Image (cartoon, grey):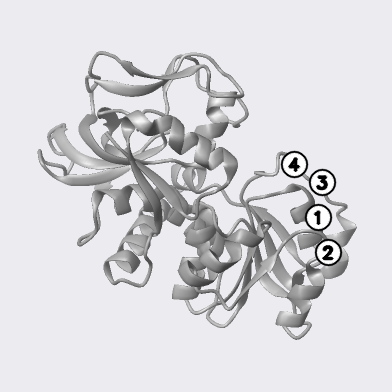
Amino acid sequence: MKAVLVNRLSPDLSGVELAQIPQCKPGEGEVLVRVRAASLNYPDLLMTQGKYQFKPEVPFISGLEMAGDVVSAPEGCGLEVGDRVMGGAKTGAFAQYIALPAASVRHMPAGISFAQAAAMGAAYHTAYVALVEIGGLEEGQTVLVHGASGGVGLAACDLARALGAKVIAATHREDKIEPLERIAKPDAVILNTGRFREQVSELTQGRLCDLVYDPIGGDVFDESTRCVTFGGKLLVIGFVSGRIPEIAVNIPLMKGFSVVGARAGEYARRFPERGKRVAAAVGELVTAGRINPHIDRTLPLDKWRDAFEAMQRGEIVGKIVLEP
């Protein structure tokens, strides 16, 4: 089978290739899925460089999440041959076939495509865990979403708006403002460069934000500490900027806000029933048409390099999907 194989870690993808390898075989309790679509996530790029917190041994097949149809399944797992499913693990999705534990695979929501299913898992589960499970989002609250044009950021904008929140989408690129206004449909779009607190204060009549969703870190995190209202939460999603920030604890003490990390995968592993609840809630929202995963582009698997380089350049809005 064809697969995007990481043979060695490299800053420029030189250690990655599209390889022809033996088709994977399911082990005990595993489901074999023919991959129809797989979406690119920022951790996929980081793992090729050895910069992600999870560091698989090389060689490994890249790809966090996918959607496809069941080729074989263990008896009694609730899946049948031909079922349309979605799911994934930390690696393995950028291939024509993938073998996964049955618990890592679930039925696709009704009425969506393989590409949409592949694009919604990690992004929307992260958004739901952060905003709802941890953030306690309520209708009418204000959410500031950084990295709003990326997969997890755009999902957070979409989900927060669907749940009745006021959304301020933030980006560091002027050329992303118009696409964000058109696709995310937030209440406002701001540039999160420099001192953006004044913009947030003006938009909220001085009240600031109940939740700040931050996959960026670095300077954006530093300034975001000035944008959280008393009793609010600053949700730490990741560090795309490359700098892991630090905070003097007197700041959340004096301003009365919380700094909370949100890792959807770990959340589901530690709290399996809550993880199922999150998946069900996201599935219901997409089936009802209240959320809509946005796909920037769809490429064949042999164009994997174009996909990774587009993500490196930050030129996408939403998700890139690869179709094996």
Kindly identify the amino acid type of the residue bearing the numbered disc 4: Ile
Kindly identify the amino acid type of the residue bearing the numbered disc 2: Arg
The single residue placed furthest to the bottom in the displayed view is 205
- Which is more N-terminal, label 2 or label 3? 2
- Which is more N-terminal, label 1 or label 3? 1
| Mark 4 Cα shell of 10 Å, populated few (<14), some (14-19), many (≥20) | few
In this rendering, position of residue 147 left or right of residue 185:
right
| Mark 3 Cα shell of 10 Å, populated few (<14), some (14-19), many (≥20) | few
Kindly identify the amino acid type of the residue bearing the numbered disc 1: Asp
* Residue 52 on image: x %, y %: 59, 31
Please tell me how many numbered marks the rendered image carries: 4
**Residue linked to disc 3:** 246
* Residue 292 on image: x %, y %: 37, 64
**Residue linked to disc 4:** 244
Give the quarter of the image for residue 35. top left
Kindly identify the amino acid type of the residue bearing the numbered disc 3: Glu
Please name which of the two marks, 3 or 2, marks the residue nearer to the observer: 2
Please name which of the two marks, 2 or 4, marks the residue nearer to the observer: 2
Question: Which secondary structure, mark 1?
Answer: helix
**Residue linked to disc 2:** 195
